[in-house]
Amino acid sequence: MNTIEKTHPGTSLKSLPVLFAALCMLLCLSACRPKPYPSLLLAADSLASVLPDSACALLVSYAADTADEPQYVRMYYRLLCIKAKDKAYIVHTSDSAILPVVAYYEHHKRLPHLPEAYYYAGRVYRDLGDAPQALAYFQRALDAMREDEDMVLKSKIYWHMGTLLKQQNLYLEALDAYRQSLECFKVLKDSVNMVYSYSQLGGLFMNLEQQDSTVFYYRASYKLSCLLKRKDLVRVIQGILAYYYTKEKKYEIAYFPLQQALQNVEKINQSGIYSIAADYYHKVGQLDSAQWYYNKLLSCGTLYVQEWANRGLASIALSQGRTVSAARYLDQALSLGDSILKLTRTDEVRNAHSHYNYQLREQENQRLKLQNLRQRQTNAAIMVAFVLFVCGGTFYYLHRRKVMRLRLQVAEQLQAEAYRNSRQFVEDNREHIHRLENRIQELNTQLQGSSLQCEQLQQQIDILSHMNRQVELEQNKRLLDQDLFSQSEIYALFRQKLTTGQAVTSAEWSRFAEQLDSAFDGFTQKLGRLGQLKEKEWRASLLIKARFKNKEIAALLFLSPEGVSSLRRRLCAKFFQNGSEAKEWDKFILSL
C-alpha cells in the first residue's frame, strides 16, 4: 500500500524565519559588493606608468563625470590623479589631495589600494621635504602588504626609502633598504634597475670607506650593463668608476672608463659626467681640458656644480698668473655660495618644522583613532564582533598558555640535560662525594658494625665518580668538536662574508646549520623542540652557537648591535619565565 507522509503544519512555519534571514543576508552581500570600476579609469591606470601625460589628460576629461559616481569610484579617481602626476614628474605642493584618500582606504581595509595610497602619500611628503613623514608612510605601505604581494610596488618603496635615508647620511639603514629593493628586482628579473641598485650600493660602501665592497658592486653594475648591451647604462657606470678611481688617485685606471663615459653624453647625464672629467683633468695637470669642462658646467650644471666649477676655473687662472680672471671667477663662486647657503638654511628650517609638524600630526591621528573607536563601540554590530573577539581571545589565551607551558617544560628538560653535561654538575658531584666520604668516616667512628651502609655509600661514590668521568669526556669532546667546526669550510665562508660585507644566501645558511648538527649532535633538532622561531631568531641562535661576537652577528644579519641584543633578550623572555638578559640566552644556546 502506498502511503503519503503529511508534513506537520508547524514545521513549515518554523522554517520561515530562517529562510527570511538567509535571504536578507544574501541581499546584503550582493548590495555591499562594489561594482567594477569604469573602464576609462582602468585605462588611465594602465597608461599612468607608460604615458603619464596621456593619463593626466584622460583623467581631466572624466572629472565632471565623477560627481555622480559612488564614493569608492571617486576615491579611486583621486588616487589615479595623484599617481599620474607623480609619474609625470609633477612636483606635489600640498598633502590636501592625498590625506582624504588615505583616510578612506584605511577605513575600508578590505579594498586593495591601501598600500598604494600609503606609497603615494610618502611620495607627496618627499616632495614637500618632510622626510620623517615620507618614511613613515613608506613603512605603513610595507606593513599593509603581504610578503609576496606586488613586488613592483615593494621595490619602489624600498628604493625611495634608501634614497631618503642616504640623504640623511644614515648609510647603514640605506644599505638595508637598497638591498631589499635589489632582492625585489631580482624576483621581477628587472635587470636595468638591478644595475642602478648595484651602483647605489657601491656608492654607499664608498661613503662607508669599505673599498672591497665598493669595487665589488661597481663591477657587478658594469658587468650587468654590458650583458644588457645598454650603452647608455654602460657610460653612466663607467663615469662612476672613473670618479671612484680618481678619488683613489688611480689616474691611469680612471682614464679608460672616463673616455668611454664621455662618448655621446646624454643631456640628463652631462652635469655628472662633465664634473668627473673636469676633476680628473685638473688633478692630472691637463689644465686646458679641465678648463673646457669647467666652462661647460657653467651652462649645464646644478647650482652646486656651478659654484664648484667657478672655484676650479679660479684655481687654474691663479696657477697661470691671470689674477683678474681668477678674481672674477672667485667673485662668481662666492655669489653662488651665498645662494647655496640661503638654500641650505631654508632646508634646515623646513626640516625642523617638518619634524615638529610630524609629531603634531601623529598626536592628532591618535586622537581621531580614539574618537572613531568610541563611535564604533556604540554600534550594535560591533557588539557582536566584540563577543566573537572575546571568545577568540580567550581561546587564543588558553592555547598560548598551553604552548608556553610546553615550551617551559622543554626548556627545563634541555637545561637539565645541559646541567648534567656541565662542569658545574661535576663540581656538585665532587662536593657530594666529599660529604659522603665525611659521612663514611662518621659512620665508621660511630657504628663500626654498619659495614653494609658503608658499602652502599661507597657504591654511590663509585657511580658519581664514573658519571663525572663521562661528563669530563663529553666536555673534552665538545671542545674538540668546536675546534673542528672552526676549521670547517662553511665557517671560513661566513668569516669571509663578514669581512666583505656580502649577504649570506639561504643555501649557505642551510649548510651552516647542517655543519652545526654534525659537530654538536643535532643542535638544531634540540633548538627546534622549543617551538618555531622566526628567521632572524633562528639564524642569530646558529651564530651564537658558532661563537660569533655580537657585532659580527649584527653585521651578518644586517642589524645594529642594539637590535641583536634586543632580539636575544626577547628570546630569553619568550622561553624562560625569569629570563630577561641577553647573556642568559647565549649561555643556554652554548649549553645545548
Image: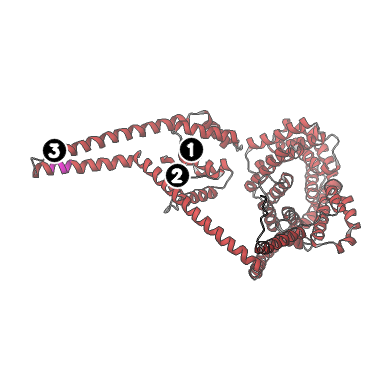
Please name whichever residue, 234 or 62, is drawn nearer the observer in this view of the structure.
62
Q: Which mark is residue 586?
A: 2
Q: Would residue 440 appear left or right of 216 to someone viewing this image?
A: left
**Residue at the spot 47% in from the left edge and 54% down from the top edge:** 401
Residue, far front: 1
Task: Residue type at mark 1: give it.
Answer: Thr
Please name whichever residue, 85 or 379, is drawn nearer the observer in this view of the structure.
379
Contact, CB < 8 Å: mark 3 with mark 2? Answer: no
Residue 15 visible, this orientation: yes
Asked which colour scheme the image uses, the reply is secondary structure
Task: Residue type at mark 3: give it.
Answer: Leu
Residue 410 picture location, percent across and down:
42, 45
Query: In the displayed structure, would residue 375 be above or below residue 347?
Result: below
Q: Secondary structure at mark 3?
A: helix
Q: Which mark is residue 524?
A: 1
Residue 23 picture location, percent across and down:
73, 60
Mark closer to the observer (3, 1): 3
Please name whichever residue, 197 or 429, is drawn nearer the observer in this view of the structure.
429
- Secondary structure that dominates the magenta span: helix
Residue placed under numbered mark 3 in the picture = 452
Residue 464 picture location, percent across and down:
26, 37
Mark closer to the observer (3, 2): 3
Residue 122 visible, this orientation: no
Task: Residue type at mark 2: give it.
Answer: Asp
Q: Which mark is residue 591?
A: none
Between the C-alphas of marks 3 and 2, the distance is 46 Å
Between the C-alphas of marks 2 and 1, the distance is 15 Å
Upstream in sequence: badge 3 or badge 1: 3
Is 143 magenta? The answer is no
